[in-house]
Amino acid sequence: DTEVTQTPKHLVMGMTNKKSLKCEQHMGHRAMYWYKQKAKKPPELMFVYSYEKLSINESVPSRFSPECPNSSLLNLHLHALQPEDSALYLCASSQDGTGQGGLDYGYTFGSGTRLTVV
Amino acid sequence: RKEVEQDPGPFNVPEGATVAFNCTYSNSASQSFFWYRQDCRKEPKLLMSVYSSGNEDGRFTAQLNRASQYISLLIRDSKLSDSATYLCVVNLGPDSWGKLQFGAGTQVVVTP
């Protein structure tokens, strides 16, 4: 299995809703990432989990809350989002969690969740 | 100055022609380099890593020039299916927790 699977593929939520995005990989990768991508812009890093511990939070607002229940799963909990949070949310993984995992092999991205906040 | 810069294009390329474009990076500590391809409304997909000696994968050739801090991608015998945005990606290495720096992408449009 060489895939990163994200669910749901599409999500529409109101500003008072609570929802979660899910990401799963079975490649034995020890680092997992959340990226946000707006139209015609490159992906922007949000969070990095390394060996199931949060190692980087790129000053993301607290209405986004990541969780890593185990080495294969990564969640992003959403609460009280704003319309400007509408974007493609990408999960990625890389081989090891020391920061070296992506050096030779790059990252594998999931197909993303397209989020619309209304 | 952006950390990774690319010509946004679009590069309009007749089918069968060759197209090449560069990407410059500002951080000399950058350790590894990649080209990703992203189709409209899809996720980025790794096209190829870029090695110091240059490397080729079929119709695609990537080069790295550390002295001038740029990488390049050349596509030979362009196919309609090569139409996409090509993202230059730089890995800053373990000291930066392997953070990736993305360029804004170069759009390639292959025409019949």
Image (cartoon, coloured by chain):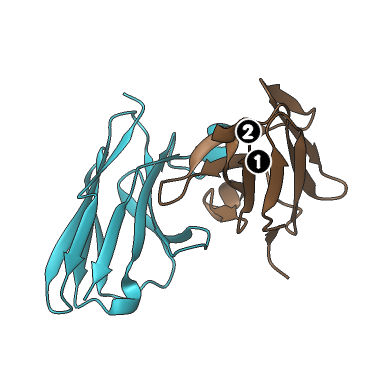
Chain colours: A cyan, B brown
Q: Residue at x 61, y 32 (%)?
A: B48
Question: Within the image, what quadrant is residue B27 found in?
Answer: bottom right
- Both labels 2 and 1 in a single chain: yes
User: Which residue is denoted by mark 2 in the rendering?
Assistant: B49
In the foreground, A94 or B41: B41
Q: Which residue type does callout 1 highlight?
A: Ser
The spot of residue A103 in percent (x, y) is: 58, 38
Q: Which residue type does callout 2 highlight?
A: Ser
Q: Quadrant of the N terminus of chain B?
A: bottom right
In the image, B39: left or right of A21?
right
- Work out whether A83 lies above or below B37: below
The spot of residue B101 in percent (x, y) is: 59, 55
Q: Residue at x 14, y 63 (%)?
A: A19
Query: Residue A56 bears which disc, if any?
Result: none
In the image, B73: left or right of B39?
right
- Which chain is disc 1 placed on? B
Crowding around mark 1 (Cα neighbors within 10 Å: few <14, some 14 to 19, many 20+) is many
Q: Are marks 2 and 1 in contact (CB under 8 Å)?
A: yes
User: Which residue is denoted by mark 1 in the rendering?
Assistant: B32
- Which chain is disc 2 placed on? B
Q: Residue at x 72, y 57 (%)?
A: B7
